[in-house]
Image: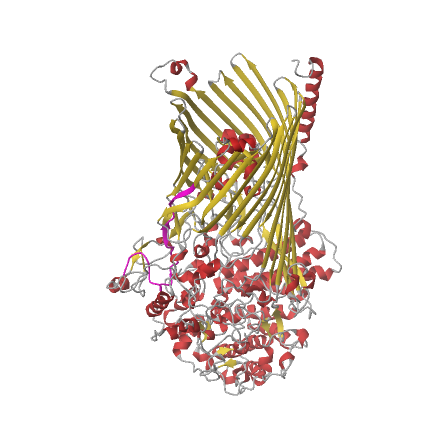
Amino acid sequence: IVSVNSAKLEKTINSNLTKTLQGTVPGLEITNTSFKAGAAQTITIRGDNSLSASNAPLIILDGIPYDGSLNDINPGDIESVNVLKDASSSAIYGARSANGVIIISTKQGKEGKPKISFSSSYGVGSIANKIDMLNGDEYISMLQEYKRWRNLTTNFDPLAILQTNEIPNYQAGKTTDWIDLGYRNSMQLNNEFSISGANEKTSYYNSIGYHKENGLALGDQYTRVTLRSNIKHIPTKWLEIGSNLQFSYSDYSGTTPDRTALVYSSPYGQVKTSTGDWELYPVYPQTFLYSAFADFNATNDNHVYGGIVNVYGVLRPAKGLSYRLNLGYNLNSNYLGTYYPKNTNTGKGANGLASKTSNLNTRWTFENVLDYKTVFGSHTISFTGLFSREGNTSDQSYLTGQGFVSDATLYNFMTSASIKNISSYYTESYIESLMGRLNYDFGKKYFATFTVRRDGYSGFGANNKYGVFPSAAVGWTISEENFLKNSTSMKFVDLLKLRFSYGINGNMAIPAYRTLDSFSSVPMIFGDNSTTVNGLLNSVIGNPDLRWEGTEAYNVALDFGFFKNRLTGTVDLWKSNSKDLLMTRSVPVMNGYSSVWDNIGQVENKGIELSLNSINITKGDFMWNSSFNFSKNSDKITSLSQGETKNIANLWFVGEPLSVIYNYKQTGVWQLGQEAEIAASPQKGEQPGAARLEDVNKDGKLDASDKVILGSRTPSWRAGLTNEFKYKRWSFDIFINTVQGIKQDNGLLFPIKYGIDKNANFLNIPYWRPDRPNNRFTSVGYMNPWNIPYLDDASFVRIKDATLSYDLSSIGIIKSWGINKLTLSVTCRNLYTFTKWIGWDPETTVSGSEALGAYPSAREISFGVKIDL
Amino acid sequence: MKNYIFNKQGRNFITMVIASLIIVFAVSCNKDFLVEKPTSFLGPDNTFNTADGFKTAVVGLYAAQRRQIVGEDYGLFFVGTDIARVGLTLPKNKYIEELGSNVQPSDFGSFWDWGYALVGNANQILDKLKTTDVVWAAPADKAQVEAESRFFRAYAYRVMTYCYGDLPIVTELTKPFRNDFTRQPVAEVQRLIINDLKFAEVNLPETTTFDGKLVKAAAQHYLAEVYLYINKPDSAEIWATKVTTSSNFKLMTSRFGNALSQPGDVFSDLFKENNANRTKGNTEGIWVQQWQYNVIGGDEGGYTWDRRDMVPFYSLNSGFVLADSLGGRGIGRVRPLTWWLNAYESQDIRNSKYNIRRHWYFNDISKPALYGKELPITDILRNSGSLYESSTKFDFAVTAVNPSFVNSAKDKYIIRLPETYLLLAEAQMKRGKLAEAAASINVLRSRANATPVTAAQITMDYILDERGRELFGEEMRRLTLVRTGTFMDRVVRLNPITGPVFKPFNVLFPIPQTAIDANTGAELKQNPGF
C-alpha cells in the first residue's frame, strides 16, 4: 500500500489527479498517450496482466467502485490516495482487483469553525518540442531527390515538380509553416471553492470547481465543472450515517485541424481559396491529400455528465462490532454531436453529414460489511464479512444523417436528412461477491491476514459464474523485537518490518454476452432505390465454458525507518502469474466461424520496487527533503493456446514480453559501391539508399521466417525523484521522472507515411543522399516495400514539475484580515526532456503513421493562489 | 459498555442484525441474479422461432454472397489468367502474375474464408429448419428458405472448389468447434453442389418482383455448368436449354433503359447504371447482384472493386482530371491482354467506342495547351497502369459528387443469359453437335452484329474467346479456365508475363495457412507446389 495525502497532492498546480501522481508511486504506471486538452492518462499497476482485457486498475471512490474518468474528480476534493498493489491488500475489493486498486478518499469537514477555501491558478504554455520540417528550398530539393532516386522524371525544374496549387506560391516566394498555423499557446484556468466544518455530531464538506483548458491545437478545449457534498452525521454512539455526492460536467467540444496533415502539408501548399474558404487540397485536387483544415468548419460537441450518490450507515451495536451498509449509484452520460457542413471535405460528398450519440451508463452497488474486533492481552483479532451486489447497464443510441437542406440545423434536426441510419445497444451485467477476512495481530509484532472471497459475474457460462479466490499475508515488525530495541549497535533502526503476501485475484476480463451466440444485422436491398431490408449473419459464437481469469501473486516487502526516521522507505519484490487468460482463439474457418473466446494463455510479471524518503538537511529555517522511487518490471507470455508458441496475428510469443516489435531486422542502409552485394542479396533490384535488411536464416530469401523480435514497447524501468527545499516562507519543489528501455517505431522517419509521392513535406533529417550517405536514414525515395519499422529509443528523462511557493500566512496583516492561510505559487511543467527520440513527445506511444499526428506536449507556466478563511 | 446499547437489548439487536444478514446472504443463493437475459441482440434462440426469423436470416446470405466482390483480392480472378494482367502494381496481384517464390499461402485465402463463412451461415439455417418447428404461411415458404440456403451453399462450394480444388465438406454449423477437418475430393464437392442445386431448382420461383433474388433459372444455369465440369454434356445441355428456352429470359436486341438520350448501343445500355434489373425492362440478367451508392443496404461495408480494378489510373497523367465521362476514379489494377483487344471484328458492337475506350483525350481545362488533345497510349503508359484500352462496363458515375470514391456501386451481373448460351454451346460441342453449338453462339454474335460463326470453327478455344468477347470482366475468368481444364494451355499461349513461368500446380490457389494452422486435430494438406 502506498499512500499519498492531500498536502502532497496540492503542492503542484495540476488539473487532474493522474498528472500529479505520475512518476511518484513506484509500480503505478501512468502514461500520456495524448496531450489533448482533457485527455485521460492510461494507468496500470505493475504492468499488464491480461492480453485481451483491460489492464486498468479498479478505482474505489469513497468506498464504492468508480467507473468515470479520474479527470472528472476535482483534485482539490481529494484527501488521500492509496494504491494497493499486492494480492492480499486488494483482495477485499474483489471482483476486479487483479489489476490493482486505487482508493481515493475525498475530504471531510474538520472540527472547528467553518473553513472557507479558495484556490485559483492560471497558466499558459507552448509546444515543448516543435518538430523541424523542411523549409521551401529544402522541400524542393527533397522532391528532386525523391524523383531522381525513383527515376520518375528527367525534368527537375521546380515548376515541373510542383503541383498546380503550389506553383503560384513558389513563384511569389510564399511559404507556410502549417504547424504554426495549426497550433497556438495553451491556457489553463482553475478555480476551486469549498466550505467545510464539523461539530462533534456532524461534519460537512461542500465544494465547487471550475476548470478550463485550451489545448495547443486550434479549437481544442476542455471545460469541467464539479460539485461535491460530503456529509457525516453521528446521532448517537451506535449509529453513523453519511453521504457523498458528486456531480461533474465536462465539455470536450471543439474541432481541431488534422494534426497529421499539419505535418505533411507542403510549405508551398495553398491555405485558403480566393473566396476565403479553406482550400481542401493544398497541393492538387487529384492527389486526395487533404488540408489539415478540410474539416475544420465542422461542429463537434461532446458533453459528459457524471453523478455519484453514495449513502451509508454504520451500526455499532456492541463494542468491537459494526455493521456497515453502503449504497452507491454512479451515472455517466455522454452526448456527442457532430456536423460536417457542405464546405468540408467529409460533408461535401454527403451534402452535410450529422451524427449524434447518446450514452448512458449506470452502476448501482449494494454492500454489507460486518466487522468484529476483539482484543485480549497482546492479541488483536478482527473479522470482516462482506456481501455485495453490483449492477451495470450501458445504453447507447447512435444516429447519423446525411443530405441536409441547410447547414444551419447542425445535428439538431436530423428529421430533415435525406438518408438516416439509427442503431442502439444495451448491455447489462451483474456481479455478486461474498468475502470473509480474518486479521490477527500479536503485540504489534506479528501480523497475519487471511481472506477468502467468492465472486460471481453474469458474463460467464452457467457452470462457471463463480470463482473462489483466497489470499494471505503475514508481517513481522522486527524493530519491535527486544533484540533490536536493546541493541546499541542497531540503535539507528526505528522501523524494520518484513511483509509477505500471497493471493489469487480474479479478473472478469470480458464484456457481457460472450457466452451466447449473437448475430449481426446486415442491411440489404432488392432493386434500385428499393427499401432496405435487414438480414442476419453470425457475429459472435458464444463459448458457454468461459470462466474467471486468475492472477496469482507473491509479494515480499521490507519497510524501514532509520536515523530517527530521517530515512524511510520500502522495498518490494513481487511476481505474478496470470492464468486462464481470456483470449480469442483461432479455430478452423471451416466451422463457419474463425474465432471463439476461450480461457487460454498465461502471463508472468515480476518486478522490484523501491521508494526512499529522506530528510537531507533540517537546519534552522532551512529544510531539504528528497524522495525517490524506482520500479522495474518484466512481463512475459508463458503460454498460449494448446502448445502454440507464437501467435503472429496478435504478435504474441511465448517467453517474450506482451508488446513486442516483430519485423525484419534493418542492419543499415545500402551504400554506393555495394550494387554487386545488393544484386547478390535477397534484396536484388533495390538500390543504394534502401534499407539493408538481414537474411536472418541465411536461406537467400527474405520471408516471414526472417522476422525477429526487435524490442519491447514496455519500458524496462521507471524512476522518479522529488527534491523539496524550504526556507522560511519559501518552498521549492522539483520533480524529475524517467522512463527507460522502451522502443517504438517512429512513423515520422518514414517518407512513405507522409505521401511524398503526392508532394508532401518531410521531417528535416539528414536522409540518405549520394552526397550525404549515412547508415541510419534511408533515401526519401525508399518506399519501404518490406514494411519495416524505423525503430527509435523512446526512453526519456524529464524535468516534469518545478514549483516555487511563498506562504504569507504568518504575516501579521494577513492574519488581521482573518486569513488563516495564503500561499502564492508558480509551477513550471514539462520544463525539459532529455531523449534520443526524434519527433513529438516520446511519451505519446502511438506508433507508425500516427506518430506524425501525435499531440504535442506543452511547456507550461502556471501561477496559483490559495486562501483559507 | 455504557457507551453502547445496554446489554440485553444489545444482544437482541445483534441477533437482529445477524438474522438480517442471514436473510441477505440467503438472497444471494438466488441464481437468477447472474443469468444473462439478452434483450438487445438477436441470436439463434430468438430468431429461428418464427418464419420471419428464417426469412431474415436468408437475406443475410445475399449480403454475405456480395462480400465476394469487396476487396482487392477480387482482381485475382482476372490477373495471371489468359485475359488480363496487372496494371498498376499491387504486390499480391503481381505475385500471382509472376508466380515467383513470393506466392505465400496467406495471400490467397480470402475466398476460402468468404466461402466457409457463407457455408456456415447457410448450414445454420438448414440445421434449424430441421430442428425447429415454426408456423409457415405456406409450405412453399419453407421450401424456398431451404432452396435459397442450399443454393448459396452450392455457390460457395462452387467458387471454392474452382479456386482451391479438394475441400473439407461441412454441412452443419459445428458447435463446439471442430479442428479435425480433412479435404474431400472435388468429385464429392461436385455431388454436394448438384444435390443442393437440384433442390433449389425445384423450389425456387420462376420469377420474382424483387430484383436480385434467386430464381429457378439461376439454379439451372449452374447445374448446366457443374454437369459440364463433371463432363456430362448431355445433362448440361438439358439444363442450359431450360434457361435459353424460358419465356422469362431473352437477349436485349434494341436500345433500352435510362441512357437512351446518350449515344450508344444495346450492349452499352446493358451496362449503364440502374439498367441491369428486370424491373427496368432488362430480360437478360438472370441473377443481378444489387448495389446502390449511399443507400443503407446498398453496400457491404465496402463496394465492388470493379471500377477500381478495370478503369485505368488516368488521373496520374498531367492533363487529366477525374471525370465521370472517363469512367470515374479507377486505379488500373487489371489490364486486358493484347489478344483480347484484337479479338473483335470492327463492326462488332461489343468493340464499339461505347464499350471499349481506346482513345483518351486530355480533359483538364486548367491545362489549355493539352485540353482536348489525345494522349496516345504507349507501352510505358500501359505498364504504369495509368492509361490503357479498357472496357466501359465498369464505369460508375459518382465522381462529380464524391471524387475520391474509388469503388463502384453499380449492380453487377452474376449470371447474364449470354453465358447460358455459351454453356449450351459448350455442351453441344462436347456432344459433337457443332452446328447447334454454332447456332447457340450466333444468337450472341448476331445481336452483336458480328459475322456468324460456322460449325467448322467451333472449338473449345473459340468458345473461350467468345466468352472473353462477350463476358470480359463479368465472368470470373479463373473459374472458367479451371472448369474447362484449359488454364495452363491458354495462359502459356496468351499471357506473356505469366505464361513463361506457369507450372501445372499454379492452376489452384494455395489454401490459407491460417486454416491449416488452426486445424490441429488433423492434417489439412496444402495444395502441391506451395
A746 with respect to B208 (left or right) = left
* Residue A88 vertical placement versus B164 (above, below): above
In the rendered picture of this protein, how many numbered marks are placed on residues? 0
Of the pair A131 and B521, the residue shown nearer to us: A131
Residue A158 falls in image quadrant = bottom left
Q: What range of the chain is rendered magenta?
A: A773-801
A714 with respect to B22 (left or right) = left
Point out residue A521 in the picture as x, y percentages from the top left corner: 63, 56
Residue A815 falls in image quadrant = top right
Is residue A258 visible to the viewer in this orientation of the structure?
yes
Of the pair B420 and A541, the residue shown nearer to us: A541
Residue A785 in magenta? yes
Is residue A44 visible to the viewer in this orientation of the structure?
no
Please identify the quadrant where the C terminus of chain B is shown.
bottom left
Please identify the quadrant where the N terminus of chain B is shown.
top right
A520 with respect to A495 (left or right) = right
